[in-house]
Image (cartoon, grey):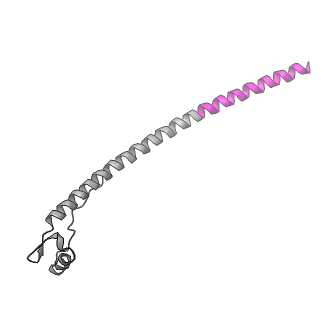
Amino acid sequence: PFQAQPEEPFPRCPQARRAMSAAFPEMGDRSGVCDFRQEQSLLRKAADAEAQFRNIIEGKRASTAEKHLELQEKLSAAEEVLRREKDAVLEFQSEVSLERWEGHQE
């Protein structure tokens, strides 16, 4: 199953943090140090939710593939039965045609 890997979405170096702070002032600047803990928490929750959805989708995909295989097997079996019935009908038709032909010859 898919698992989200926790990762730090924002750079650790002070220069990069200042750049991020300048680019995203609404994220909260505390004396030149950004506090992204809430955003990191939200990102982790989103990643966890995505992982759950991926697992659900993968489960449904596997279930669908299994059902498809079962239906293919049933179809193959039904086609084989139909082929045998067709062969039997053709054999019977040949016998009837031969009997009619022999009946006209007498």
In-front residue for pair 81/19:
19
98, above or below 9, in the image: above
Up the image or down, 33 lies above or below 103; here it is below
Name the residue at 59% across, 34% down.
80
Q: Check residue 53 for magenta coloring.
A: no
Q: Position of residue 32 (x, y in %)?
A: 11, 78
Residue at figure coordinates x 75%, y 26% from the top left: 93
Q: Residue furthest left?
A: 31
- Image height check: is 18 above or below 51? below
Of all residues shown, which one is farthest toward the front?
Answer: 26
- Looking at the image, residue 56 sits to the left or right of residue 39; the answer is right
Which is more toward the observer, 35 or 3? 35
Left or right of 1 in this view: 91: right
**Is 96 a magenta residue?**
yes
Q: Where is residue 58 in the image (x, y as percent from the top left)?
A: 36, 50
Residue furthest out toward the bottom: 15
Q: Is the magenta stretch mostly helix, strand or loop?
A: helix
Looking at the figure, which quarter contains the C terminus? top right
Q: Which of the two residues, 20 or 91, is positioned nearer the viewer here?
A: 20
Q: Nearer the viewer, residue 72 or 46?
A: 46
Residue 49 percent coordinates (x, y) = 26, 54
Residue, far right: 106
**As drawn, 3 above or below 93:** below
Total number of numbered labels?
0
Coordinates of residue 5 in the picture (x, y in percent) = 24, 61
Which residues are drawn in magenta? 80-106
Residue 20 lies left or right of residue 97; in this view the side is left
Q: Is residue 66 left or right of residue 74?
A: left
